[in-house]
Each structure stands twice: as C-alpha cells, then as structure tokens.
Amino acid sequence: MKLSVIGCGYLGAVHASAMAELGHEVVGVDVDAGKIASLAAGRAPFFEPGLPEILASALETGRLRFTTDMAEVQGASVHFVAVGTPQSKDSYAADLTYVDGAIESLLPYLSEGDLVVGKSTVPVGTAARLAEIVDAGGSGAMLAWNPEFLREGYAVKDTIEPDRLVYGVADDRAVPILDEVYASAIGGGSPRLVTDYATAELVKVAANAFLATKISFINAMAEIAEVTGADVTQLADAIGHDARIGRRFLNAGVGFGGGCLPKDIRAFTARAEELGRGESVAFLKEVDAINMRRRDRVADLAVEVLGGSVFGRKVAVLGVSFKPHSDDVRDSPALDVAVRLKGLGADVVVTDPEGLDNARARHPQLLYTEVTDEALRHADLTVLVTEWPEYTALDPEHVASIVRQPLVIDARNALDSAAWKAAGFAYTGLGRS
Ligand code: UDX
C-alpha cells in the first residue's frame, strides 16, 4: 500500500520505517528539515534500538523516503498522523496545535476513499472534531483513530508485533483498509479491536493511566515501607505472584517519566474536568503527586547520607534518560534529581550511555561525562537513577577503589545490595530498610 506518515519523531520515524520494512511504500513528512535530512541519509535522529537497521534496509529497497513537502503525500491512500501532543505551557491540557496543523495541511492533498489515521495520543473527543474538519474538506476521505502503544526502547518490536491493534472508526469501510496495512501483525496473531472514536481515544489514556497508577501504588507502599522498616521489593515480589496483580510495573524507585505517562495522566485529568467528570480521575492527581515526591525523596536521602548537606560534595549521577535503552530525557526523573542536587550546591557529574546530548541541551549548567569512571572518580556519593545494564553490572569493588566515599543510593532498586555492601558501601535503596 502507499502510505504517508506525518510527523517523524519517536513514533512516526519508527512507524514509517517499520511499515516500509513490511512491504508498504511510505513517505515520511516532518517540518524539521534537519530531522528529515538525517532520516533520508539513513541516520536515526534519536537512539532507538533496531531503528538504524530497519531504516537502512527500508531506504535501500526504495520503498521509504522522507520529505518536508506535504504535497508529496499525494498518491498515498492512507495518511498516518503521528505528531506530538505535549503538555500545554500554561495548563495540564494536551497541546493539540501540531495535530490540528497536520490535519489542516493534509486537507488539500486528500482524495476520495483516502483514510486519515490518527496515531497521536489525544483527549477524548478530538477524533470526532477532526472528522468534521476532514468531512468539511469535501475530499471524501475518512478518518480513523488508531492509538499507538509502543514503548521507547522496544518501539520497533512493538510496531511490527503489536500486542493489540485498536481501530476507532465511524465508517466500517475503514476496517479492511487498516487490516491491509496491518496484515503482517494480524497474520502474526495480534488481536484487533474495532471501536468508536471515543473508545479508541480512551483506550490509550486509560492504559497509560493504569500503568502510572500501578507504579505510584508501589511507590506509595515504598513510602510506608520507609517508616516501618519493611522492604518494598520483597513486598512487590510477594504481591506480584498473585496473577491478578502481576509483578510487571511494580518496580518501586524514583518513579515514572518520559514523553507519555506524566503528560498523559495530566491531560486526562484536564479533559475529565472539561467534561464535568473531574472527580472520576481525581486520583490521578495523587498518582502524579506520589510520583513527584519520589524525586524529592532521592534528593532528601542524598542530603541525609552526606550528613546534612550536599554543598560542595561531588555526586556521581548514573543515568539521565527517563529509562534505559532510550536517549529521551523528557520529564526524566534522573535529570530532575541531578538538577535538584545541583540546586542544593552539590558538584553533580552526570553520565549516561545515550542521553547526554539531550540533557546538556536542557541543562547546560550540569557537568557531563561519557566515561562512567570519570563520573565516579572521587565521588562522595554515587546515585543510580536510570538502571542501564552497564550500571547494574558495575563491579562494586572497582567503584569502591575510585570513589572518595563508599556511599550509594540505588534510586531504582536495581543494584545487588549484598554485593555493594560486601564491597564496603553504605547502600540505600528506596522503600527498603
Ligand atoms: C509508555 C507505555 O508503556 C506505552 O505503552 C505507551 O505507548 C507510551 O508510554 P514509555 O514512555 O516508553 O511507554 O515507557 P515505560 O516503559 O512505560 O516506562 C515509563 C516510566 O515508568 C519510566 O520512567 C520507567 O522507568 C518507569 N517505571 C516503569 C517504573 O518506575 N517502575 C516500573 O515498574 C516500570
């Protein structure tokens, strides 16, 4: 099929490459000329495992191209909208400027029978509003909403083998078109659900709200564990054996971040308030508050273990991306902790395998190094904030030999505490005695 993908960020670049890899002919469009030049040259503009490989192989087939010129979507019959919906500057609501702009600029190029497919995460009610705009354009094109559930770090796999497909449609003629787009995933057994627009939009925000709630639930238990001497990791293991609860997303620590969970739960509360149902999701404000308190807790612990002040003390911050296998620092708990410690007067040195450029662009006042040992050398305190495998695999004996003081805070409960203690470290996890 001939497809276009509008927006070539974390979502769109992977979607465009994966669709071309699966045999479709794809044009990716973005307003950012630098990003388009990079993609067209086969360079992924961000770190995503597996993307460079599928980008290169899809470009080589000639089925994938990138452009800043919207007119080049002509000839494609399915147009994916994969632009960002960030948090608004002045409120919790999602900023729909880019989605609205993408639809407006697509309109002149749509033809009878074309399908516009929204993938961006939007407040419930957006698809119905956009469908009216598409209808008013008079092209005879249809709109569907097909939310994306990919996780950064696993985006290629999640796109090629999604754990479910959701089609929000107003016209059943959209269904066989989407089935053809996703023939490979459907053939591979991915379940597909056909819903109305509102349900499809809600599926996405409900899924992210549930995941955020699960993480904040275990972090709330960590807060209780901290005042009772209980161990939240053992608690999570024990309750996780109940299949109804499950162990996944019960890792207590510094909490969730990234470009989705934080802004999606905030946008959901804002939308529910607009709909007069603010009380239905009021608990998400508490989910957010618990999550933000974990960042304070790590900063407080740093002050505590350093005897009352971090001022002038060297703190090695291991990890800055919001999670391992990603260079994304949007709403990253790790970056936030580093900034807080710097604000308290610590000499913060941050290291990360992939996230340094993005972190440096946002917070040039921090010191950065690509070399883990440089960050650790003469450190008074080591704080693990993003559980990259290279940090969880560190040899504590080696670390002990280069730091000034053997103090470690494990803000992800990801280190082998016994091994670090055996190497002489005073080990502090979160929610653990
Ligand atoms: C999330 C959803 O998982 C995905 O389905 C949706 O499409 C986009 O949002 P992503 O933002 O890539 O994906 O990250 P995810 O793997 O969900 O992790 C989110 C945050 O939660 C990370 O900061 C992670 O460190 C944190 N987390 C995760 C925990 O603190 N504890 C856990 O047990 C799991």
Image (cartoon, rainbow, N blue to C red):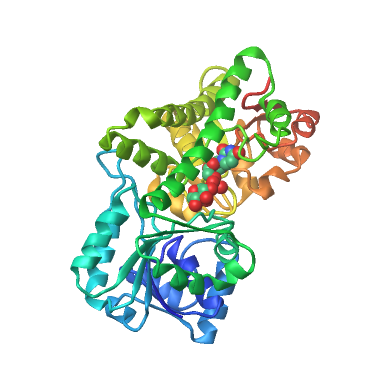
Specify whether residue 134 is in view.
yes
- What residue sits 29% from the left and 72% below the top? 141
- What residue sits 49% from the left and 73% below the top? 181
Does residue 277 lie above or below 261 as drawn?
above
| Numbered label tally | 0
Image quarter for residue 375? top right
Placement of the C terminus among the 4 image quadrants = top right
Q: Residue furthest top?
A: 228
Does residue 276 lie above or below 394 as drawn?
above
- What residue sits 28% from the left and 78% below the top? 112
Does residue 198 lie above or below 300 as drawn?
below
- What residue sits 34% from the left and 84% below the top? 75
Residue 53 in the image: state x and y as whole percent: 59, 73
Answer with left or right where residue 125 lies relative to residue 66: left
Viewer-side residue, 392 vs 110: 110
Residue 7 in the image: state x and y as whole percent: 37, 65
Image quarter for residue 66? bottom left
Residue 68 in the image: state x and y as whole percent: 31, 75
Q: Give the quadrant of ligand 1.
A: top right
Q: Residue furthest front?
A: 172
Residue 352 in the image: state x and y as whole percent: 57, 49
Does residue 156 lie above or below 231 as drawn?
below
Viewer-side residue, 170 vs 359: 170
Viewer-side residue, 303 vs 277: 277
